[in-house]
């Protein structure tokens, strides 16, 4: 009986209506977590509104990526120090770019388990988790923002056509 059941995704608040909003909402939640206020709905909503209005900006993910790679010589997913290699957050086979912002260090076990899935799809469907490591999630959000911007899908909703806007819609654009 050791297998985990599929986790349930909590839908975003009703004010989150598009892919753009969903990405900003998730980034606002990361900001709240960093400030030690992850349970404070008002704080999260305040960050969300400021991100929407352009009053606060995202950090430069290329700088973050390079710094993270220099500091940590461990698997970003499980913490292993053995058999490390470069792994793409958004797989190249699904349109991810081979750039520092899209790569992390991962052990061979995590890398092969993840395969051609994007990081959220892998965490949710294979690992049965709804939480992605914070630094990876921050970079993933920025990458999917750029990808949706290129494909003009930021103002769309429910890309995976499951009847609701949720985190699975972010990576639905990568389905081939």
Image (spheres, helix red, strand yellow):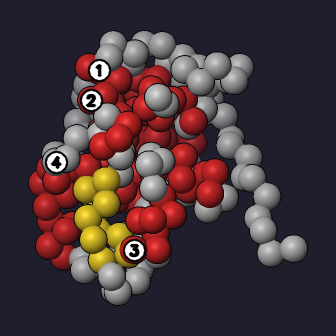
Q: Is mark 2 on a helix, strand or loop?
A: helix
CA distance for labels 1 and 3? 32 Å
**Residue count near mark 4 (Cα–Cα under 10 Å), binned few <14, some 14–19, many ≥20:** few
Above or below, 91 relative to 86: above
Which quarter of the image is occupied by the N terminus? bottom right
Q: Do the residues labelled 2 and 1 touch (CB within 8 Å)?
A: yes
**Residue count near mark 2 (Cα–Cα under 10 Å), binned few <14, some 14–19, many ≥20:** few
CA distance for labels 2 and 1? 5 Å
Q: Do the residues labelled 1 and 4 touch (CB within 8 Å)?
A: no
Q: How many marks?
A: 4
CA distance for labels 1 and 4? 18 Å
Q: Earlier in the sequence, mark 1 or mark 3?
A: 3
Instruction: Read off the residue under disc 2.
Output: 146
Q: What element carries label 3?
A: helix
Q: Which residue is drawn at 57% across and 36% down?
A: 168
Residue 4 appearing in the image: yes
Q: Nearer the viewer, mark 1 or mark 3?
A: 3
Disc ID at residue 108: 3
Tell me where residue 104 appears, x and y as whole percent. Answer: 28, 62
């Amino acid at each position: 009986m050791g297998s985990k059941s599929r986790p349930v995704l909590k839908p975003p608040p009703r004010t989150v209506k598009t892919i753009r909003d969903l990405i900003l909402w998730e980034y606002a939640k990361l900001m709240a977590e960093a400030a030690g206020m992850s349970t404070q709905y008002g704080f999260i909503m305040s960050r969300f509104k400021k991100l929407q209005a352009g009053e606060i900006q995202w950090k430069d993910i290329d700088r973050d990526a390079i710094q993270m790679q220099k500091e940590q010589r461990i698997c970003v997913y499980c913490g292993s120090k053995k058999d490390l290699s470069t792994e793409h957050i958004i797989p190249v086979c699904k349109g991810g770019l081979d750039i520092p912002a899209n790569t992390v260090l991962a052990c061979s076990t995590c890398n092969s388990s993840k395969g051609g899935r994007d990081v959220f799809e892998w965490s949710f469907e294979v690992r049965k988790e709804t939480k992605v490591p914070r630094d990876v999630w921050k970079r993933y959000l920025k990458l999917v923002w750029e990808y949706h911007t290129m494909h003009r899908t930021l103002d769309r909703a429910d890309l995976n056509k499951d009847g609701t806007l949720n985190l699975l819609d972010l990576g639905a654009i990568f389905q081939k």
